[in-house]
Image (cartoon, rainbow, N blue to C red):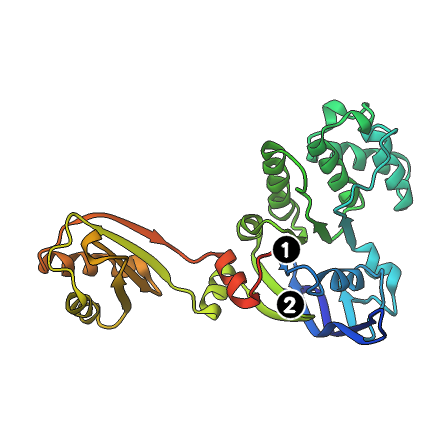
């Protein structure tokens, strides 16, 4: 798959109020492939905003290069920026104008005119599901409708790469679902590439083909969610509740580990009399059958089994030491 956005060796340094240096970005390399949704995550102050500002052409790096669709952002900024659509977190629209008037206005700023402009406006209104409300002032829209109009403005000129900065902030669950579905449709129906930032970990996990984690100005991890789980060394956690504790003791726990050929770590889930076993394994579901067999051989009856697989949030916490909103 070809690369659409490539950032190489990006560095950016600021000066604090006391004059001391602050390294916002340190040798960041980033490559986003055509047709993928790339989730960029980082704690507050990690350098994410600086990186996005440089990619968007709003800020120049101290060193490094950004190439979008083969166009160097420094040498050929108009061509590079023409391939980029931006959906900012702060609403960028005129509330006194209708949805259609907003799209016409921003379409003209992109150089669209006449029948082509009207066609793009019609298509965009359909895509963001506002065709039936197109003549109403934006001031009368709900928060979710304004968000969808904001997305439409960023898509009007048919960019190859769309940067979306927390597009579901402050919306109700139904509007959030519609926005997430529209992001998936951008890739599935239009082959568009999406750079997506969010403070909602479940969004990144659902949408992203790949995820990049930035912290202290460095891209510290990158890959699919599965790749990141392996990099972090996170394991599945199985909670086994027994009908009764029986002969559950330390010797039995060691016996169970031997029966699983060292593929898992087995421990008590509390006082022995509670009859709970905790099992940590890299592939928890695969060892479930031999584990239950071993418990049966030991004369123990299983009441219930709960499997907790590691997710993006546990990986993020381990790699950065912070929750996403810290």
- For the point 80% across and 73% down, which residue is it? 13
Percent position of residue 253, x then y: 19, 66
Q: Which mark is residue 191?
A: none
Q: Residues within 10 Å of mark 2 (few under 14, many from 20)?
A: many
Q: Which quarter of the rendered picture does the N terminus lie within?
A: bottom right
Lower position in the chain sequence, tag 1 or tag 2: 1
Q: Which quarter of the rendered picture does the C terminus lie within?
A: bottom right
- For the point 64% across and 66% down, which residue is it? 214
- For the point 65% across and 50% down, which residue is it? 191
How many numbered circles are shown?
2
Which residue is at the front of the view, 121 or 180? 180
- Taking 26 as reference, is 5 above or below it? above
Percent position of residue 63, x then y: 81, 76
- Report which quarter residue 254 is drawn in: bottom left
In the shown orientation, is residue 136 left or right of residue 142?
A: right
Q: Residues within 10 Å of mark 1 (few under 14, many from 20)?
A: many
Q: Secondary structure at mark 2?
A: strand
In the shown orientation, is residue 98 left or right of residue 300?
A: right
Q: Which marked residue is nearer to the observer: mark 1 or mark 2?
A: 2
Q: Secondary structure at mark 1?
A: loop
Residue at the disc numbered 1: 35
Percent position of residue 22, x then y: 77, 73
Real-space Cα separation, disc 1 to disc 2, in angstroms: 26 Å
- Report which quarter residue 276 is drawn in: bottom left
Percent position of residue 167, x then y: 69, 44
Which residue is at the front of the view, 15 or 48? 15
- For the point 64% across and 70% down, which residue is it? 219
Residue at the disc numbered 2: 215
Which residue is at the front of the view, 210 or 93? 93
């Amino acid at each position: 798959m070809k690369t659409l956005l490539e950032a190489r060796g990006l560095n950016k340094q600021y000066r604090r109020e006391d004059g001391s240096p602050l390294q916002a970005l340190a040798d960041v390399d980033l490559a986003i492939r055509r047709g993928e949704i790339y989730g960029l995550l980082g704690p507050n102050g990690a350098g994410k905003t600086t990186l996005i500002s440089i990619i968007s052409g709003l800020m120049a790096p101290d060193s490094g290069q950004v190439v979008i669709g083969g166009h160097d952002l420094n040498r050929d900024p108009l061509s590079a920026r023409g391939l980029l659509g931006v959906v900012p977190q702060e609403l960028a629209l005129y509330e006194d104008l209708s949805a259609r008037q907003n799209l016409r206005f921003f379409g003209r700023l992109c150089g669209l005119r006449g029948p082509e402009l009207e066609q793009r406006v019609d298509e965009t209104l359909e895509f963001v599901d506002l065709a039936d409300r197109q003549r109403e002032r934006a001031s009368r829209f709900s928060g979710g409708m304004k968000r969808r109009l904001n997305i439409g403005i960023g898509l009007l000129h048919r960019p190859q790469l769309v940067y979306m900065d927390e597009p579901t902030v402050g919306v109700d669950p139904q509007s959030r679902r519609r926005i997430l579905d529209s992001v998936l449709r951008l890739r599935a129906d239009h082959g568009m590439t999406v750079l997506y930032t969010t403070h909602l970990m479940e969004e990144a996990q659902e949408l992203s083909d790949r995820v990049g984690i930035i912290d202290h100005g460095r891209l510290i991890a990158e890959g699919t969610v599965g790749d990141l789980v392996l990099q972090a060394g996170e394991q599945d956690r199985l909670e086994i509740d027994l009908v009764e504790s029986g002969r559950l003791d330390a010797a039995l726990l060691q016996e169970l580990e031997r029966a699983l050929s060292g593929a898992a770590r087995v421990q008590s889930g509390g006082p022995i009399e509670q009859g709970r076993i905790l099992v940590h394994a890299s592939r928890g579901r695969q060892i479930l059958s031999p584990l239950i067999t071993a418990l049966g051989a030991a004369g123990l009856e299983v009441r219930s089994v709960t499997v907790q697989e590691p997710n993006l949030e546990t990986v993020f916490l381990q790699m950065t030491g912070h929750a996403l909103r810290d």
